[in-house]
């Protein structure tokens, strides 16, 4: 159990960092100014980075947040989306996280496949990290706030209305969405061993009998 928890903390902290880094990179390419990247929730374990772009690592790697200085492109809500042009810009920044995670999956898959082909053995950690990264990508696409898919959906509603959602509406949608998001999170904890087991068996190379 202790080894599993350490694995979860390390792997998901790295995955969330890559995911939020994707948000920040797309924001920079759109001329926005990332102010803070937060990985995890709970007490802060470490703060650092330049004064104008702070990085915060928190205790539990369950969520992440990238904040930008331009209030019209805030990533944590739909309070400033008033048209389809703003929605496209907002959606582009939100998609950066998933694209960064999928890029990591592609690179890791190539490395793991090469390693296994050369040694004729399964790369256990590599396969599990790839499975976790894919789960994170799919999970974030769910149309449930405060996940990226849910935030894109809320901003689309604002763009369709041509007016920002009220603060009260956003609050209750975020609270309700978080309550709903707990369900797939609970299912993930109960299905994680099955997902990892499938990742370890899928196209696994035959063990070389000449190796110990």
Image (cartoon, rainbow, N blue to C red):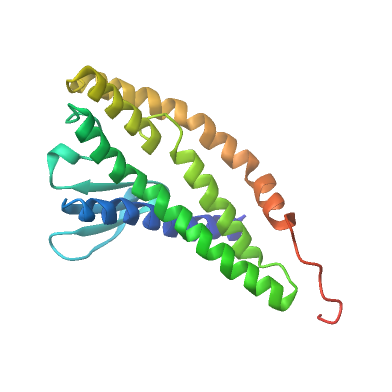
Identify the residue at image location x=27%, y=52%: 26
Q: Quadrant of residue 89?
A: top left
Residue 76 in sight from this viewpoint: no
Say how many tags the image has.
Answer: 0
Q: Position of residue 156 (x, y in %)?
A: 30, 26
The one nearer the camera, 61 or 129, is 129
Q: Would residue 48 be visible to someone looking at this image?
A: yes
Residue 204 placement, left or right of 13: right
- In the displayed structure, 60 sits above or below 104; it is above
**Which of the pair 82/7 is nearer the observer?**
82
Q: Residue at x 30, y 20 (%)?
A: 172
Tell me where residue 73 appears, x and y as whole percent.
Answer: 19, 40
Q: Where does the C terminus fall, quadrant-wise?
A: bottom right
Residue at the spot 19% in from the left edge and 53% down from the top edge: 34
Residue 63 vs residue 10: left or right? Answer: left
- Left or right, 175 with respect to 107, comes to left
* Farthest front residue in view: 85
Residue at horizontal 20 percent and vertical 50 percent from the top: 30
Q: Position of residue 154 (x, y in %)?
A: 31, 26
Height in image: 66 above or below 104? above
Of the 4 image quadrants, the one containing the N terminus is bottom right
Write down the quadrant of residue 121 in the picture.
bottom right
Q: In this rendering, is residue 161 above or below 81?
A: above
Q: Is residue 91 left or right of residue 166?
A: right
The image shows residue 148 at horizontal and vertical percentages of 37, 38
Q: Name the residue at the right extreme.
A: 209
């Amino acid at each position: 159990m202790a080894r599993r928890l350490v694995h979860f903390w390390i792997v998901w902290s790295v995955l969330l960092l890559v995911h939020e880094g994707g948000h920040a990179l797309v924001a920079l390419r759109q001329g926005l100014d990332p102010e803070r990247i937060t990985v995890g929730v709970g007490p802060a374990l470490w703060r650092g980075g330049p004064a104008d772009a702070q990085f915060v690592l928190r205790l539990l790697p369950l969520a992440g947040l990238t904040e930008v200085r331009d209030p019209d492109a805030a990533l944590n809500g739909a309070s400033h989306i008033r048209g389809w042009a703003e929605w496209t810009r907002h959606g582009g920044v939100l998609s950066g996280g998933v694209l960064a995670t999928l890029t990591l999956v592609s690179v890791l898959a190539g490395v793991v496949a090469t390693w296994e082909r050369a040694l004729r053995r399964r790369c256990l950690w590599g396969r599990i990290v790839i499975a976790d990264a894919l789960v994170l990508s799919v999970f974030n696409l769910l149309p449930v706030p405060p996940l990226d898919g849910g935030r894109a959906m809320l901003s689309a509603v604002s763009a369709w209305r041509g007016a920002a959602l009220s603060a009260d509406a956003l609050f209750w949608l975020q609270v309700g969405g978080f309550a709903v998001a707990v369900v797939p999170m609970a299912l993930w904890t109960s299905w994680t061993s099955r997902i990892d087991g499938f990742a370890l068996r899928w196209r696994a190379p035959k063990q070389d009998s000449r190796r110990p």
